[in-house]
Amino acid sequence: MAAKTLYWATRPFGYVGLELDRGQIFEMAGARNDEKLVRLGYVQQYTGKANDLVECAACGGRFIGHNERIYHYEKRHVAHNPFTEDEMAEREECRLEEIAPLNLDQTAATLAA
């Protein structure tokens, strides 16, 4: 039996009813926009070993590293007040623009030009 292809989210986004966080491992569901997610850089194929993944103790989600798991845990499983949520969202967006920029030069409009 062939191993399933795993992907990891390069930034948080919703996918077929799941809220994925950066570094979270998942299987593509054959959704309509799967190709776009890869092309634009929202996801990358996971090429590491299954033993290298780390698991969230609260929900069982698998992640490519400890930092990604810790960030997920603090975001999803720790109560925040509105002020810390806003601050956290701003920090996250700035950080993601640095470490995981989207491939906006690969949009359908850009490629058609």
Image (tube, rainbow, N blue to C red):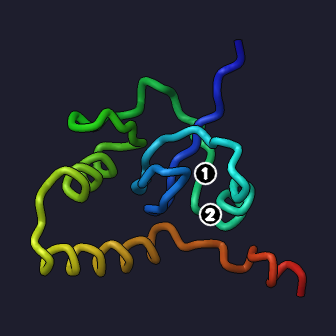
Q: Name the amino acid, label 2.
A: Gly
Spatial CA distance of label 2 from label 1 is: 7 Å
Name the one closer to the observer, 74 or 99.
74
Tell whether label 1 touches label 2 (CB within 8 Å): yes
Quarter assignment of residue 98: bottom left
Tag 2: Cα neighbours inside 10 Å, few (<14), some, or many (≥20)? Answer: some
Q: Residue at x 55, y 50 (%)?
A: 16
Q: Name the amino acid, label 1.
A: Gln
Q: Which residue is mark 1?
A: 44
Q: Residue at x 30, y 46 (%)?
A: 69
Left or right of residue 31: residue 95: left
Q: Secondary structure at mark 2?
A: loop
Residue sticking out furthest to the front: 17
Residue sticking out furthest to the right: 112
Instruction: Name the disc covering residue 41, or none.
Output: 2
Left or right of residue 95: residue 32: right
